[in-house]
Amino acid sequence: MATSFVDSVMAGVIARNSAEPEFIQAAKEVIESIEPVARKRPEIGRLKIMERIVEPERQIMFRVPWVDDKGEVQINRGFRVQFNSALGPYKGGLRLHPSVNLGIIKFLGFEQTFKNALTGTPIGGSKGGSDFDPKGKSDMEVMRFCQSFMGELYRHIGPDTDVPAGDIGVGGREIGYLFGYYKKIVNEFTGVLTGKGLSYGGSLARTEATGYGLVYFTTRMLENAGTDWKGKEVVISGSGNVAIYAVEKATSLGAKVIAMSDSNGYIVDEEGIDLKSIKRIKEVERGRIKEYLAVRPKASYKDGCDGIWTVPCDVALPCATQNELDGKSASILVKNKCRAVAEGANMPCTPEAVQIFLDAGVPLGPAKAANAGGVATSALEMCQNSMRLRWTFEEVDSKLKGIMDGIYTQCRDASNEYGMKGNLVAGANIAGFLRVSEAMIAQGIV
């Protein structure tokens, strides 16, 4: 029954989304994971819960015209995919990157649905963005784009409908421009976006949340293996928000981060990454990571990103982008006796890499669980906005750690219950699916 269930659902996914490989990949992982759930609970198949989940409730695509500093008209494409609202208002980030297309946004929204469910907070799943590239653009160009983008998006969002946040290419600057224009259009000051600045409703610890949460989740993985962060050498891909604050938290717990990367290449510093320099280069100067050598000449730099996984380490945290860690890289990490891998980016490990880690017994924290700290703290920001108050950094951080501990426990328990002990990938898929499916069953065929 279960095999025919998987084959049937996947046939529909492939037929309807044949040009969207990332979405098919994400859907296949979840559908295969819930085989034992479908076998144990026949109403899942009878009510076509999975067939309904893989079809977004709403897909919005729109034109985004804006004027650059030369006075020339530019045109981009905007997206918002509102995937599932069974648990609450849609919630998910906005990505600004040339690679953005409908398939990427659908894969991210699908993953977001289960990630949000795992947090235990009352939020559904969505994702959005544009193929606009903020790199190299002036503040005024970014503002004009954001205002044009929000000029259409505002019709589809709201504090009780859909609450966007940041993602790749969308930081505090972009959120500020988006929020300001939304406020002007609708004449309301509401918590319609998260990741806002502290001066206008943002939450303390939101900037750090995804990176910190990743480390909190990995801490539980290490504890389960009978160890901790002290003395561990860590490789972290990326040098954006997630990577930077994963470095900060892991270092504070006794680890030594020895490698980081950006889209051009990677650095290795055997003495341990100087985070202050990385923050200045990436957050203040918006520079390239190779500039790190100017302050740490004993470090090394290599062009290209793949080679970062050849650096021997105890813990690997891929925090750059989807499918960055392939089977070859996974085999190298296993050979070098890496003891734990946790995904800080969305689906950074290819299916082949995932299988290699599972077969080798290397604990793998999947993105929908391990990097849920950002959206968890976004939900906390929504709470604070609704109550018109602000919690301290320590209060938010404590709640974040509690949420990440709860997510790990859900993943572990679900994998044990359904006969896949130690497989946190399957555990995350099952735990998230069960929460969404139970709400969908209760609400009828809608």
Image: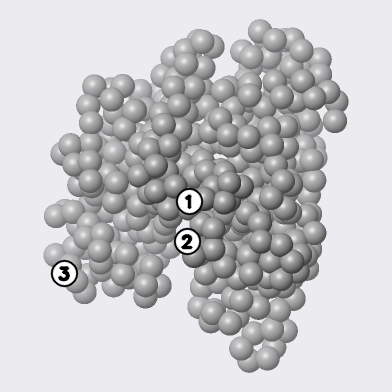
Instruction: Name the residue nearer the viewer: 12 or 428.
Output: 428
Q: Are marks 1 and 3 in contact (CB under 8 Å)?
A: no
Q: Is residue 352 left or right of residue 123?
A: left
Image coordinates for residue 434, horizontal then vertical, percent: 63, 21
**Quadrant of the frame with the C terminus:** top right
Q: Amino acid type of disc 3?
A: Pro
Q: Is residue 215 left or right of residue 367?
A: left
Label number found at residue 305:
none
Whether residue 32 is visible, yes or no, is no
Residue drawn at point x = 23 percent, y = 51 percent: 258
Against 307, residue 189 (above or below) is below
Mark 1 packing: few (<14 Cα in 10 Å), some, or many (20+)? some
Instruction: Name the residue nearer the viewer: 160 or 426.
Output: 160
Image coordinates for residue 328, horizontal then vertical, percent: 40, 41
Q: State which tag comes first along the sequence, 2 or 1.
A: 2
**Quadrant of the frame with the N terminus:** top right
Mark 2 packing: few (<14 Cα in 10 Å), some, or many (20+)? few
Q: Amino acid type of disc 1?
A: Arg
Instruction: Name the residue nearer the viewer: 109 or 399.
Output: 399
Q: Which residue is mark 3?
A: 297
Residue drawn at point x = 56 percent, y = 30 percent: 120
Mark 1 and mark 3: span between their CA atoms? 43 Å
Name the mark nearer the viewer: 1 or 3: 1
Q: Which residue is mark 2?
A: 198
Task: Give the colour scheme of this rendering.
Answer: one colour
Q: Amino acid type of disc 2?
A: Leu
Q: Is residue 238 left or right of residue 94?
A: left
Residue drawn at point x = 38 percent, y = 67 percent: 283
